Image (cartoon, helix red, strand yellow):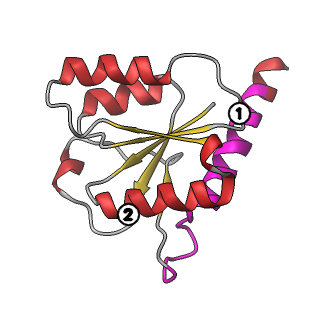
Amino acid sequence: MILMAVMGEKESEADAFHFAMVNELGASRVRRVYLGFISDINERLRRLKLETSGRWSDEVVTLVVGVNSAEEQAMLRQMGAFVCHQYGPLSGVYHQFDIKPVDVMISQSDSRPDHVLDALDAYSECYIRKRDRRTKGAA
């Protein structure tokens, strides 16, 4: 399974990203885990573990949406998630989030800069990186 964490506060942008993935890959290959409705951080972390455990094919992508704490981001990074940041002005939640050089910038806007990927390009990038991790680990 490819685990992608969609960071940022714009729910509409996360929805557009999700719908583009479903449109391209099919509903059976895209899972969406939304944590925004759970207020307790311990419950959010428990739910995150529960929803991302199990063996899934790399043909399946799980989008984690509604991440709003440093603990969740750290757990996702530890799980091997690819962190995707919504392109645009940084919102208030970014005072607690790290943006690392390996993270991906995403947007569904037609006027996005070259370094910002749309849904399909972001998935492709994550798929290749996951394959490269596995290849390097086997060597």
Residue 61 sits in quarter = top right
Q: Is residue 22 among the parts visible in the rendering? A: yes
Q: Residue at x 41, y 18 (%)?
A: 49
Whether the magenta-drawn stretch holds residue 112 is answered as yes
Q: Position of residue 20 (x, y in %)?
A: 55, 62
Q: Which mark is residue 92?
A: none
Image height check: is 34 above or below 7?
above
In three-dimensional space, the C-alpha distance between marks 2 and 1, rounded to whole angstroms, equals 24 Å
Local crowd size for mark 1, using a 10 Å CA cut-off: few (<14), some (14–19), many (≥20) = some
Q: Which mark is residue 13?
A: 2
Q: Position of residue 52 (x, y in %)?
A: 49, 24
Whether the magenta-drawn stretch holds residue 132 is answered as yes
Q: Nearer the viewer, residue 91 or 55?
A: 55
Q: Residue at x 31, y 16 (%)?
A: 46
| Nearest to N terminus: mark 2 or mark 1 | 2
Tag 2 near tag 1, CB within 8 Å: no
In the rendered image, the quadrant that contains the C terminus is top right
Q: Nearer the viewer, residue 137 or 31?
A: 31
Q: Give SS at disc 1.
A: loop
Write down the residue under mark 1.
58
Q: Is residue 42 left or right of residue 105?
A: left
Residue type marked 2? Glu
Q: Residue furthest right?
A: 139
Q: Residue at x 81, y 28 (%)?
A: 135
Local crowd size for mark 2, using a 10 Å CA cut-off: few (<14), some (14–19), many (≥20) = some
Q: Is residue 64 left or right of residue 25?
A: left
Q: Residue at x 24, y 50 (%)?
A: 94
Residue 126 sits in quarter = top right
Q: Nearer the viewer, residue 135 or 15?
A: 15
Magenta-highlighted residues: 110-134
